Amino acid sequence: MAVAGSEGTTRRRAPRADAALNRESIIEAASQVLAEQGTAVDVREIARRSGVGMGTLYRHFPKKEDLVRTVLHQDFSKWAESAREAAIDAKDPWAALTDFYEQALTGYARHSAIMENFALTWSDSELEGIHQLRLVVEELCTRAADSLRPGVTTDDLLLLLVSLGHAVQVTDKRDSHMWNRLLRISLDGLRADGCEPLPTDASPNTRRPL
């Protein structure tokens, strides 16, 4: 009786293991395809690369949006974490900030779906990946406070990443020369030495007419 029970348990576990393996294969293939082609990708290409049928893909992800959301969450978290690790490895605060942007933009250039998504979601601090990235930028901003021009905020640094990300999109991603130049120009603009005060928000009554 014990042997039969053991065999029955093995049979029940096998389909679960296969299902988990199929799901992992789908996510891995989707990550590759979304990085290459962006969110407009045909799910048939994902199924082909993962080695599963369309029926299996839809059992795990009934809607394409479900799969895209899962992959973006995973890949965005990895992207943010790799940028954080690059910043932590640099002992000098300014080098840490520089390394963060270089790592973030290099990873950004390799992932079309993140490119498409980040500009739309960067201000939503409720999203886990964005929250994770914001914490990294806050830490960098605090560490480099003595080197940054007065008034620079976490939102400034995040929005700069969005802007530089757009530069990555409109230049040849295979040649980082152009957006690297813009990064250096932007970082120079963040330095505290020899800069004018940043403009502040003006109330409607104090704004000058155009």
Image: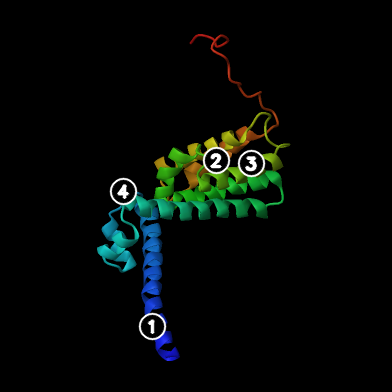
Is the residue marked by circle 1 packed among few (<14), some (14-19), or many (20+) residues within 10 Å? Answer: few
Residues tagged 2 and 3 counted as in contact (Cβ below 8 A): no
Q: In this view, does 70 lie to the left or right of 123?
A: left
Q: Is residue 164 above or below residue 112?
A: above
Say whether disc 2 or disc 3 marks the residue closer to the N-terminus.
3
Residue 54: x %, y % from top left:
26, 62
Residue 34 tag number: none
Say whether disc 4 or disc 2 marks the residue closer to the N-terminus.
4
- Return the residue nearer the eye: 18 or 100: 18
Residue 23: x %, y % from top left:
38, 65
Q: How far apart are marks 4 and 2 (CA)?
A: 29 Å
Q: How far apart are marks 2 and 3 (CA)?
A: 19 Å
Residue occupied by mark 4: 40
Residue 45: x %, y % from top left:
28, 60
Residue at image location 61% in from the left, 21% down from the top: 200
Q: What residue type is labelled 4?
A: Ala
Residues tagged 4 and 2 counted as in contact (Cβ below 8 A): no
Q: What residue type is labelled 2?
A: Leu
Residue 138 tag number: 3
Q: What element carries label 3?
A: helix
- Extreme-front residue of the structure: 1
- Picture mark count: 4
Judge depth for marks 2 and 3 and give the one in front: 3
Residue 8 tag number: 1
Residue 183 tag number: 2
Say whether disc 1 or disc 3 marks the residue closer to the N-terminus.
1
Q: What element carries label 2?
A: helix
Q: What colouring does the structure picture have?
A: rainbow
Q: Which amino acid does label 1 sit on?
A: Gly
Residue at image location 55% in from the left, 38% down from the top: 158
Q: In this view, does 13 lie above or below 119?
A: below
Q: How far apart are marks 1 and 2 (CA)?
A: 61 Å
